[in-house]
């Protein structure tokens, strides 16, 4: 019985230390590809935030990268480069533990712009709903979609976490510790 009380106290202390740190941990979201809105291009990449949940500002976006390709032509961009880049955010983008969402509203938009005249990708919801990718070097837009379907998501899910959250992993570990303590107590 004494071991059970001690393991419960250790578990409670660990959760008190780890849970606040998890809330502040960076979150990497993978960009969602919507083939029906992308003119045959596949989109991949990520947006990493500082872990804030709720409405984001530009300072909450730590890094990003994207690649759009149709197998012949590829457009890329990254914030992790010596090439100048910019992140433009107008209105609201919402972060949850597993998605970045762009709600419908007056001029809610996010643009990831790589280089002064290289490439950009943009999601915009306002009076005109658009989703586009531009390649300034090739002087073309791989896609420029008005009123995109975005796979039927509303608000638009522009990025998702690809794996279980850290909290789920912590819960699994806690269950394992409790099972271990119970088994040891039962053996005594």
Image (cartoon, rainbow, N blue to C red):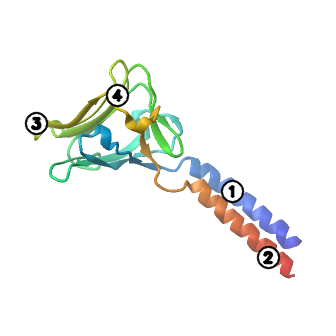
Upstream in sequence: badge 3 or badge 2? 3
Q: How far, Cα to Cα, is label 2 from label 1?
A: 21 Å
The image shows residue 81, relative to residue 177, as above or below, that is: above
Upstream in sequence: badge 3 or badge 4? 4
Picture mark count:
4
Tag 3 and tag 4, C-beta contact below 8 Å: no
The image shows residue 146, relative to residue 121, as above or below, that is: above
Upstream in sequence: badge 3 or badge 1? 1
The image shows residue 16, relative to residue 116, as above or below, that is: below
Circle 4 sits on which residue?
124
**181 left or right of 34 in image:** right
Q: Secondary structure at mark 4?
A: strand
Q: Quadrant of residue 3?
A: bottom right
Tag 1 and tag 4, C-beta contact below 8 Å: no
Circle 3 sits on which residue?
139
Q: How far, Cα to Cα, is label 3 from label 1?
A: 53 Å
Q: Which residue corresponds to the image point at 38% horizontal and 36% vertical from the top-left?
A: 150
Circle 2 sits on which residue?
183
Q: Nearer the viewer, mark 2 or mark 1?
A: 2
């Amino acid at each position: 019985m004494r071991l059970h009380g001690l393991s419960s106290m250790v578990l409670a202390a660990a959760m008190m230390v780890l849970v606040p740190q998890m809330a502040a941990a960076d979150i990497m979201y993978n960009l969602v590809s919507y083939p029906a809105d992308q003119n045959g291009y596949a989109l991949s990449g990520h947006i990493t935030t500082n872990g804030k949940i709720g409405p984001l500002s530009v300072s909450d976006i730590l890094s990003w990268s994207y690649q759009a390709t149709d197998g012949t032509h590829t457009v890329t961009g990254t914030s992790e480069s010596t090439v100048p880049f910019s992140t433009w955010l107008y209105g609201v983008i919402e972060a949850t533990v597993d998605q970045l969402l762009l709600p419908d509203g007056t001029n809610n938009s996010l643009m990831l712009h790589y280089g002064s005249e290289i490439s950009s990708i943009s999601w915009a919801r306002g009076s005109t709903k658009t989703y586009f990718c531009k390649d300034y070097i090739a002087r073309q837009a791989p896609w420029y979609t008005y009123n995109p379907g975005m796979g039927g998501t509303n608000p638009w899910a522009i990025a998702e976490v690809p794996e279980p959250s850290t909290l789920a992993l912590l819960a699994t570990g806690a269950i394992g510790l409790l099972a271990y303590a119970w088994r040891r107590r039962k053996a005594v």
